[in-house]
Image (tube, helix red, strand yellow):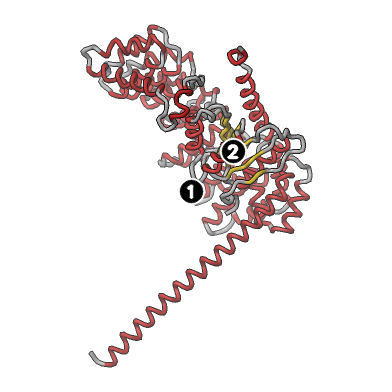
Amino acid sequence: MLGRMNEASTRAGTPPDGDATEPPIVIAEDDNVTALLTTEVLRRAGFSVVRASNGESALEEMQRHQPRVVILDINMPRRDGLEVLRIVRRNLEGARVRILVLSGHAQADVAERARREGADDYLVKPYAPGDLVERVRRLDAMLDDRRRCPTDER
Amino acid sequence: MTSATTTLLVTGTLLLGAVAVASCVALVIHHALSEVVRARRERRADGALALLVGSIVGGDDLDAVAALAVKRFGHAAVGEVLRRARNDIAGERAAAITVALEAIGEVERLRRRARSRNVARRRTAIRHLGECGGDVASTVLRAALDDSEWEVRRAARDGLLADGRPEAIRLAVDSYLAEATENLGWRRSFYARFALVAPAQLCELLHTASLNPAEEKLAIEALGHARSENAVPEIRARLTSADPELRASSARFAGKLCDHDSAPGLVALLTDPEWFVRAAAARGLETLPKPPSTLRALGTCLSDPSWWVRSNAARSLSRAGEPGRAILRSVIDGDDAYARDAARAALATLRSATVPDAAFPDVAGRVAAEPQAVPRC
């Protein structure tokens, strides 16, 4: 079937105007079409992207790259998105990462569950490329705001 | 037993064995061939995707690249990639994909298949046409609403909802209402799609009061799950519905949508004759501001005959800061066993929520320093 990747994660090309020192965005998505389209949209916006094709490799990539933003699918083999969310949010380092759940249309109840598990944002497919980029930038900026909060500066 | 009978038995057994072996061999060959075909299809689709992805996301040469991809990888692979890409991408790029699908002849191919006598083939074609978008596909979908098979009609409705244009949505809704299906899963699925694609139109439909209470309940739930803020006035208006199920759903989603103005309505529902309405109201108040009068009303619910009402009231009180917890503590030593149990359970839950997870002992001590989750209103 089209779209099921092999088990290994693959790294997207470095963007022409991306900052190589910035941690990449991790896209956890088993569907090839969605993963490549999302990667291309973000790459064109200047982000570097690392892809994971299942829940377990998503956790590994997050541990390896310490990303600021993760884009997470819900239906994935070997730990689904909700389980990944739960594990990440239990972990102190994972509490800092911003997670955007990208999921299909008829899964409105899943959006609610994802929010309960700690997703920062939920985007339903089909999405406008500009909307995705804007949300990712906003999540990224939220992380900076948090780092610059007055209690940290003291 | 005569030798003729023995010969007959042996021959029969050998024949049966031969048939069994032949069937097994045929199955193995069929499986192997299917795998080969599947792998080839995957390779072609992956190749087409790699070629098309840049043009799908941003290029103005999608038609030309799609035509090139068809030559290299075939119609089926390119059609599948473009349809699935259109499922993911909205806006201008979706329109460009539709044009490309029409240009490579995919829409026309599906239109012909939608006339097949085979129901499964017709349904698949209609479902795929729903993914194509555009006027040609929409015309076929409209005609399919009158198909003799419900599966085809359902696929056509889903396609028209995904189309998103007001007229297409109106036709899908009319067809759905005429269908009168009893299957709750399909009905929920219809409203879930509707609420996500066109929440404003679903609110308008609710506003006309043309739906029966059971359908209104599904519509309210779908809008609530979709967190549609347009739905707030409709939900608030149904807190006083004559139908208890509708009152309960409205109470639940008024809380989920954090509609502060519905707080007085929820407090009034704490004395509803139906236990599930009281329980929903108590739960709905969890995310809303709780002045002293609301806290007192929730405190009274701790003695409700229904376990759900007691439990939800205690939960809401436990999340009302110190004044709420003071009410819970005040009933812990009281005579009312119902209230005592509910308060104890809520306070115990509150305590366990602050205890770090034993699975992560190394970070346990640092968790407290992290900002705690707050209700998202």
Q: Which residue is mark 1?
A: B150
Where residue B32 sits: x, y (%)? 53, 66
Q: Distance between the Cα atoms at labels 1 and 2? A: 50 Å
Q: Residue furthest left?
A: B335
**In the picture, residue B352 is in which quadrant?**
top left
Q: Is residue A72 left or right of B263 when viewed as pictured?
A: right
In the image shown, does A78 or B135 lie closer to the viewer? A78
Q: Chain of mark 1?
A: B
Q: Which mark is residue A64?
A: 2
Tell me what residue is drawn at x 63 percent, y 56 percent.
Answer: B112
Q: Chain of mark 2?
A: A
Q: Is residue B148 left or right of B347 when viewed as pictured?
A: right
Query: Few, some or many C-alpha atoms within 10 Å of disc 1 (few <14, some 14-19, many ≥20)?
Result: some
**Mark 2 is on which residue type?**
Arg
For the N terminus of chain B, give its image quadrant: bottom left
Looking at the image, is B84 positioned above or below residue A127? below
Q: Is residue B192 left or right of A24 when viewed as pictured?
A: left
Tell me what residue is drawn at x 34 percent, y 83 percent.
Answer: B12
